[in-house]
Image (cartoon, rainbow, N blue to C red):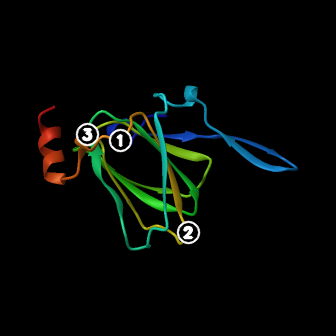
Amino acid sequence: MENTLPGNAQIIDIKLNVDKRGMLSVIENNLLPFDIKRVFWIKDIPQWQTRGGHAIINCWETLIPIFGKFRMTLNDGQNISTIDLNNPNKGIIIPPNVWTLLHDFSQGAICMVLSSQNYNDCQYINSYNEFKKLISKK
């Protein structure tokens, strides 16, 4: 299947083990194109608020809707897609230099993020105009 997401972002299936005790989801490094250096989650986001609104220069991230749902808009400077994230056994891998905006959160939604880098404010492009300038140079 041809990847049609901006910046070659990719939706992944997360392994799910189910038995009488419940469900267990597993992510191992061979599922991701990067080693995990940082894990964080966002929660208690008012439905009308957005998160993200940036691109990261040298960092890969995988976002997983642990609980509830939200929408994500991805933009690589040429293509824009909006994706519904509502299944904790599906994640989306975001390569570097893809503008990412999370929005339309359901009540109680939780988004877990697996990152290839430790936090470094200098890596973030928080201005869409700066992002467009960076992308136009490539």
Label 3 or label 1, whichever lies nearer to me, is 1
**Residue situated furthest right in the rendering:** 20
* Mark 3 nearby-residue class (10 Å; few <14, some 14–19, many ≥20): some
Q: Secondary structure at mark 1?
A: loop
Q: Position of residue 132 (x, y in %)?
A: 15, 46
Q: Position of residue 82 (x, y in %)?
A: 39, 56
Q: Is residue 65 left or right of residue 22?
A: left
Label 1 or label 2, whichever lies nearer to me, is 1
Q: CA distance from mark 3 to mark 1?
A: 8 Å
State the residue at coordinates (39%, 34%). 117
**Residue situated furthest top in the rendering:** 30
Q: Is residue 107 above or below residue 20?
A: below
Report which residue position mark 2 lands on.
108
Q: Secondary structure at mark 2?
A: loop
Camera-nearest residue between 85 and 3: 85
Report which residue position mark 3 lands on.
123
Q: Position of residue 106 (x, y in %)?
A: 51, 69
Label 2 or label 3, whichever lies nearer to me, is 3
State the residue at coordinates (35%, 35%). 59
Q: Position of residue 31 (x, y in %)?
A: 56, 30
Q: Indicate the amino acid at tag 2.
A: Gly
State the residue at coordinates (15%, 39%). 134
Camera-nearest residue between 57 and 76: 57
Q: Indicate the amino acid at tag 1.
A: Tyr
Quarter of the figure with residue 98: top left
Q: Secondary structure at mark 3?
A: helix
Quarter of the figure with residue 27: top right
Report which residue position mark 1 lands on.
119
Please state the total of marks drawn on the protein image.
Answer: 3
Q: CA distance from mark 1 to mark 2?
A: 25 Å
